[in-house]
Image (cartoon, rainbow, N blue to C red):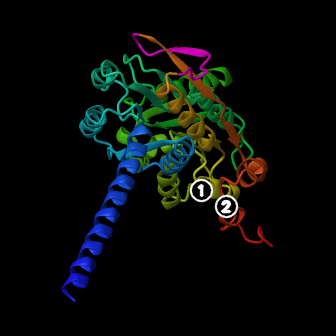
Amino acid sequence: MMKKAVFSIFLLLLLLLTGCGAGEEQVAEEAVETEDKMQIGMSFDSFVIERWQRDRDVFVSTAKELGAEVNVQNANGDIEEQIAQIEYFIDKEMDVIVIICIDSDSLSSVVQKAKNAGIKVIAYDRLIKNADVDLYISFDNEMVGTMMGEGIAGYESSGGEGVETVLMLCGPHADNNVSMVEKGFREVMRREGIEIIDTMYADGWKAELAAAYVYEHADAVNRADTIMCGNDDIATAVVRALAERRLAGKIGVVGQDADLAACQRIVQGTQIMTVYKPVEKLAQKAAQCAVALGKGEETGAENMIDDGSYEVPYMALSPISVYRDNMDEVIINSGFHLKEDVYLNVPGALE
């Protein structure tokens, strides 16, 4: 009995030891596999703007398909937090860092630190000034402004009169895209002889600041035939403020990003148009470029842009103007929004 017991204990220990060895081997294999995967750090301004969640999801899934892992961080609109996140990525020895910057002028030093560490850096959607990034990928933001301007110029008020005046309620100066959009928009206003009554800039893309402007500047609003909003989130706040004064639909509004609420307003008649930027294509391309840079390969960028100190590689995708008459073609058929969601508040539209 004793011999049998000893043999049984020996056999059990042998099995346990064999099992532990196999487990350790599997863990080791998994560790090697993780180490072999390309590591990409991605720091977002915030997720206040609706589209950023789409950008994140498409970028992460595309990078994963290409064999990379993505560490996503949210700076919540705090530039110091974003700098800390980038430094964290440097300490973690990421292969590539992708930045949706809060302030185009405040990241040059930390980007240089990343580059000195041999890490590739991509400025996503917003240019980082004086930083010599490895790639800036965005939409043609000057064209976005041109399209918004053309939407204003082609608008006829409910009385059938053309546009003579416009208010500009823009995003923040800190976002370099704002100046590019503004350039395209102002050129159309100059060409069409439309008076810009006033211009304000919403710090941090805070839509409530634009709404406050509407409440506090009644004289300017009453003079305006139209309002250019820096994005659709600002447009949402502005239209709500106009509605309280019974002016929604009487003063034409334009925006950008093709947020669901904006598309709903367009088919309802309380917003003239928006600019659709196919973020899926941008995020997919950015992920592909990030992986290429991580492998030491070329991105295929054919253009250069001046960041204030350096000429940096630049990719610009084309935006699309969205009006009521091409809503189905551009937004519904692409799957960006569902028809039942866009036409939710239009009686009989879904029958």
Q: Which mark is residue 202?
A: none
Up/down of 215 relative to 319, above or below: below
Do tag 2 and tag 1 residues touch (Cβ < 8 Å)? yes
Residue with the mark numbered 2: 342
Up/down of 234 relative to 133, above or below: below
Q: Mark 2 or mark 1: which comes first in sequence?
A: 1
Which residue sits at x=32%, y=43%?
Answer: 77
Q: Is residue 121 left or right of residue 9?
A: right
Q: Is residue 178 left or right of residue 267?
A: left
Which residue sits at x=50%, y=39%?
Answer: 230
**Label 1 neighbourhood size at 10 Å, few (<14), some (14-19), many (20+)?**
some
Which residues are drawn in magenta? Answer: 297-309
State the residue in front, 330 or 88. Answer: 88
Q: Which mark is residue 260?
A: 1
Residue at the limit of the structure toward the bottom, as seen here: 1
State the residue in front, 218 or 78. Answer: 78
Q: Quadrant of the N terminus?
A: bottom left
**Label 2 neighbourhood size at 10 Å, few (<14), some (14-19), many (20+)?**
many
